[in-house]
Image (cartoon, grey):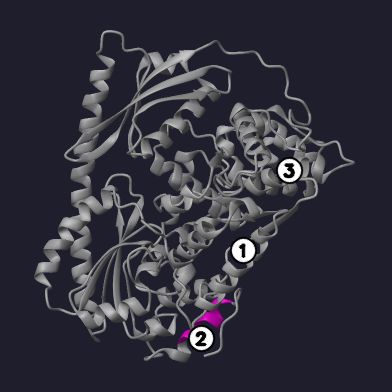
């Protein structure tokens, strides 16, 4: 079959589907729409290319609720050639159970095993990916699969939704090679998901009660002071905290607290620099019940007084490096990167997409890397044995030049085999006779790669924009000057305040895109609130949970990538239009039109 090209219309997707459909008279809109998305993603129909995430996080309510239920179901289906799988909301296979050896082998050949990502973006139309993309139960049988290697299977997948938050947690999937079993598979999958969602509700209720008890105990101590309780779904603060920490300080504190609470291993003390100049000293204790982490209790001590800072300079405190920003978190990252670079260390620069990791490395190299060549290597486009061997050979050759500074970007995208090869290559090198190695990485659901980290000397954490509240004004002015060097357009105080409240899920990349779009649009000299694009009009007064933050950011990205089209964004996220408008109001997102 000819390989479809991205960007084809729905009619072309329908035509391609009809070419392989067993019964062209029964064309299902769900499948045709999925084929269209698969073509837009550029999925190759002739090969399987499901990315692999090493050590996905299984310590989540979804797996705790689902695995005992799947164990019981496995006993009932023992001997049947049916595979049961649980995935997270991104399509990462978290668990797979199958008793038939032949089916196990077939699933291995198509990478349908734990750790691989089976979303439509990578594998095209399939039960798991299509259920997650559409938000509806999906049966994909035979030639309805987009990738040819999957057309031997019948799959029934049902989304798993949090019973109270209504956020997408993942999917339950049943796969078999037995023909004509779609009805049975869907009935069984739907029944199993109802049981899983019921157990999630029970676990959430127990966790919330446990966290509330620990929160009350902390507040009832002799000298309670400011107290905060945070879990994935709950946030509570006492009056002392809500009165003592307000405005940007409160936003910064809650962002840090959510991230700390998400790390079930952290317990102890941590100090946070707040935008006002004060320091919040956090004493963190975990709330653990029934061998499960229910969240974290924060006892908070505030050090110092709010400082009235002079207006930020037009450029940057680090003008010598050409970098914009003066927040303590950002300056700490710059200083750490300078120290690691000038000492010749091998180090990792970690941070979310778009925070400026590569920009930071390039700036430090310009300042301190005289006579040394900066070489940037991307992950290989394919992890076939030949492509992997060639990529590792190129990395070895570049490091062999002692005057080179080699930057390996986005190492979180490397598959398990390539990671092992890279570890072996680096372990065999003589550090004294090689170039300097720097890696960049984004957070993933994978566990830390301790073996790869052992070969590096240090890690530099680059903060996301939402933790650099005071830098947003400087960044906005910087990009205004870049894209209108002879212009005099400025932001009104109201527009600037709204830009500072924006969560910026894509960080610097998104700020630059927004300002570039504003400059290109005809408008007056002063940019007002009405000129801002939809993704910047966030004015929610609600204290959002970690799950709600993820959902809000997904909606913002959807609107940004679909030209503020609410109906298309709702359809692509798998929710109804009415639900989308309700969420827009709740999160304070104001698109330019709500027609």
Along the line of sight, the residue nearer the viewer: 453 or 276: 453
**Which residue ends up furthest to the left in the rendered image?**
76
Which residue matches tag 1?
395
Along the line of sight, the residue nearer the viewer: 559 or 472: 472
Badge 2 element: helix
- Tag 2: Cα neighbours inside 10 Å, few (<14), some, or many (≥20)? many
Q: Nearer the viewer, mark 2 or mark 3?
A: 3
Q: Nearer the viewer, mark 2 or mark 1?
A: 1
Q: Nearer the viewer, mark 3 or mark 1?
A: 1
Which residue matches tag 3?
363
Q: Position of residue 389 (x, y in %)?
A: 55, 73
Residue in view at x 11 percent, y 74 percent: 78
Measure the C-alpha gap from mark 2 to mark 3: 48 Å
Task: Say if the magenta span includes residue 44.
Answer: no
- Whichever of callouts 2 and 3 sits on the residue coming sooner in the sequence is 2
Residue in view at x 26 percent, y 84 percent: 177
Which residue matches tag 2?
16
Q: Position of residue 463 (x, y in %)?
A: 56, 37
Compared with 563, 100 (above or below) is: below
> Is 138 on the left-hand or right-hand side of 517?
left
Residue in view at x 60 percent, y 79 percent: 5
Measure the C-alpha gap from mark 3 to mark 1: 22 Å
- Whichever of callouts 3 and 1 sits on the residue coming sooner in the sequence is 3
Please provide the residue range marked out in magenta: 9-17
Along the line of sight, the residue nearer the viewer: 221 or 183: 221
Compared with 546, 403 (above or below) is: below
Residue 345 is at least partly visible in this image: yes
Question: Which of the 4 image quadrants contains residue 174?
Answer: bottom left
């Amino acid at each position: 079959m000819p390989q479809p090209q991205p960007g084809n219309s729905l009619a072309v997707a329908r035509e391609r589907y009809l070419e392989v459909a067993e019964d062209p008279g029964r064309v299902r809109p769900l499948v045709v729409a999925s084929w269209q998305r698969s073509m837009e993603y550029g999925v190759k129909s002739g090969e399987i290319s499901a990315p692999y995430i090493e050590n996905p996080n299984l310590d989540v309510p979804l797996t705790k609720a689902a695995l005992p239920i799947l164990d019981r179901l496995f006993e009932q289906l023992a001997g049947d050639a049916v595979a049961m799988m649980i995935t997270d909301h991104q399509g990462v296979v978290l668990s797979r159970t199958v008793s038939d050896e032949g089916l196990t082998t077939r699933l291995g050949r198509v990478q349908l095993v734990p750790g691989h990502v089976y979303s439509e973006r990578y594998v095209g139309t399939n039960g798991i990916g299509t259920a997650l993309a559409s938000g509806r139960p999906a049966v994909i049988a035979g030639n309805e699969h987009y990738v040819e290697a999957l057309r031997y299977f019948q799959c029934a997948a049902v989304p798993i939704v949090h019973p109270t938050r209504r956020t997408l947690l993942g999917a339950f999937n049943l796969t078999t090679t037995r023909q004509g079993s779609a009805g049975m598979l869907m009935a069984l999958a739907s029944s199993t998901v109802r049981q899983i969602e019921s157990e999630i509700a029970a676990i959430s209720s127990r966790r919330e009660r446990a966290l509330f008890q620990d929160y009350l105990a902390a507040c009832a101590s002799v000298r309670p002071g400011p107290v905060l309780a945070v879990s994935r779904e709950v946030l509570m603060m006492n009056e002392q905290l809500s009165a003592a920490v307000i405005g940007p300080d409160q936003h910064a504190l809650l962002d840090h607290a959510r991230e700390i609470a998400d790390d079930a291993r952290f317990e102890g003390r941590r100090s946070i620099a707040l935008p006002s100049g004060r320091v919040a000293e956090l004493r963190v204790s975990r709330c653990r019940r029934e061998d499960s982490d229910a969240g974290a209790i924060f006892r908070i001590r505030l050090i110092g007084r709010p400082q009235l800072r002079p207006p930020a300079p037009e450029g940057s405190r680090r003008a010598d490096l050409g970098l914009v920003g003066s927040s303590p978190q950002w300056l700490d990252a710059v200083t750490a990167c300078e120290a690691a670079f000038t000492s010749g260390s091998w180090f990792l620069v970690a941070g979310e997409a778009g925070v400026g990791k590569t920009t930071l490395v390039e700036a430090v190299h310009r300042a301190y890397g005289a006579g040394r060549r900066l070489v940037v290597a991307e992950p290989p486009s394919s992890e076939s044995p030949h492509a992997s061997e060639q990529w590792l050979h190129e990395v070895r050759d570049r490091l062999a030049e002692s005057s080179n500074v080699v930057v390996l970007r986005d190492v979180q995208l490397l598959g398990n085999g390539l990671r092992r090869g890279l570890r072996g290559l680096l372990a065999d090198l003589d550090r004294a006779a090689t170039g300097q190695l720097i890696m960049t990485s984004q957070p993933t659901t994978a566990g830390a790669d301790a073996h790869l980290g052992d070969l590096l000397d240090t890690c530099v954490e680059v903060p996301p924009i939402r933790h650099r509240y005071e830098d947003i004004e400087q960044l906005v002015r910087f990009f205004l000057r870049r894209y209108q060097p002879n212009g005099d357009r400025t932001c009104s105080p109201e527009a600037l305040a709204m830009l500072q409240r924006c969560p910026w899920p894509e960080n610097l990349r998104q700020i630059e895109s927004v300002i570039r779009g504003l400059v290109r649009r005809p408008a007056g000299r002063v940019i007002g609130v009405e000129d801002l694009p939809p993704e910047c009009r966030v004015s929610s007064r609600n204290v959002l949970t970690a799950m709600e933050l993820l959902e809000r950011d997904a909606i913002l990205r959807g609107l940004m990538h679909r030209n503020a089209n609410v109906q298309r964004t709702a359809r692509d996220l798998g929710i109804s239009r009415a639900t989308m408008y309700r969420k827009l109001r709740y999160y304070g997102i104001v698109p330019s039109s709500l027609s």
